[in-house]
Amino acid sequence: MTDFLAMHGYAAYVWPAYAVFAIVLFADAIAPVFARRRILRDIAARARRAASRKSP
Amino acid sequence: MNPLVLWFHKLGSPPYFYSFAGRWIPWLYGIALVAAAFGFYGALFTAPADYQQGDSFRIMYVHVPCAWMGLFAYLFMAVNGFIALVWRIKLSETLAMASAPIGAAFTFITLVTGSLWGKPTWGTWWTWDARLTSELVLLFLYFGVIGLYHAIEDRRQAARAAAFLALIGVVNLPIVHYSVIWWNTLHQGQTVSLIGPSKIAPSMLWPLLTLAIATHMYFFASLFARARVALLELESGKEWVRALLPVTETSHD
């Protein structure tokens, strides 16, 4: 196991490469989730404002 | 009309695409995760260490699929950008612009992992080699497209302007691809080929191809998620978007 983690001396290059892959793609994957939440909130707020203008 | 052509026309309608993409996203993420699990198992456990590079060659399994995706995402963006400019199809504008950040992410990973691979094998983090330089230009092209898209207020005009820039940047794609043939510098030539035999042992190849499948599936999952958000924003005044919102007491007028 230690041997595996050490990557025969290349651990300092192999693991950061895999980490960058995982972190960047994870960030890419969650970005639309937050954007979606924000936009749905905006649309709902706009709909509420429009409704309150129509029926005072 | 041919049912496939008919379906393709239907797919161009934002509400139809919205629900179509929504159905596919979990499956695409699921397939991507399963393929990535298999691929990484092969990449880290079953593939033997390279006789020259030792274990540092395992960086290939994240570097190469991401490099392929950086080019694939650009091509996808350019084709959709072309359709958007010629036929003014709203969905194509959306898909082209949704593709840009994903392609930029893949290109960024390619550059960073390439640097991490270059240090132990070439002795340098960076060199102005033709492949490395053209890949950096690819990243800047993505930044240009994303920047232009966000600099213009009108979403549709912004998408068409950015699509035009994306089309100009297509000239960089063959440069990236053929750079290792045209210029004889540090970056190695291509090992895996779609046409003709690959110069890599099968035990090292299958994890790479599995990870290529995983990254393609991931691309479409992320693309669909981003396109759905963009369509919600673009069509926020339309009936189909308002129908998605939770029903409020004021909506029965």
Image (spheres, rainbow, N blue to C red):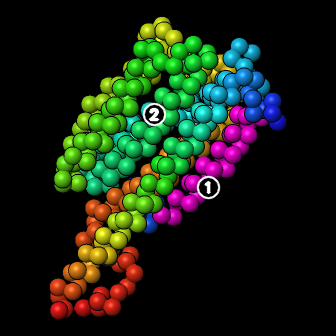
| Residue B92 vertical placement versus B211 (above, below) | below
| Residue B49 vertical placement versus B3 (above, below) | above
Task: Determine whether the residue tagged by mark 2 lies in a helix, strand or loop.
Answer: helix
What kind of residue is marked 1? Gly
- Residue B61: image quadrant is top right
**Nearest-to-viewer mark from 2 and 1:** 2
What kind of residue is marked 2? Thr
Q: What residue sits right under mark 1 in the picture?
A: B30
**Image marks 2 and 1: residues in contact by CB distance under 8 Å:** no
Report the label total. Answer: 2
Percent from the top left, x then y, of residue B174?
Answer: 39, 23
Quadrant in the picture for the N terminus of chain B? bottom left
Q: Are marks 2 and 1 on the same chain?
A: yes
Q: Residue at x 58, y 58 (%)?
A: B27
| Subunit that carries the residue with mark 2 | B
Residue range in magenta is B22-45
| Subunit that carries the residue with mark 1 | B
Residue B92: in sight, yes or no? no
- Residue B136: image quadrant is top left
Percent from the top left, x then y, of residue B104?
Answer: 41, 38
Q: What residue sits right under mark 2 in the picture?
A: B107
Task: Determine whether the residue tagged by mark 1 lies in a helix, strand or loop.
Answer: helix
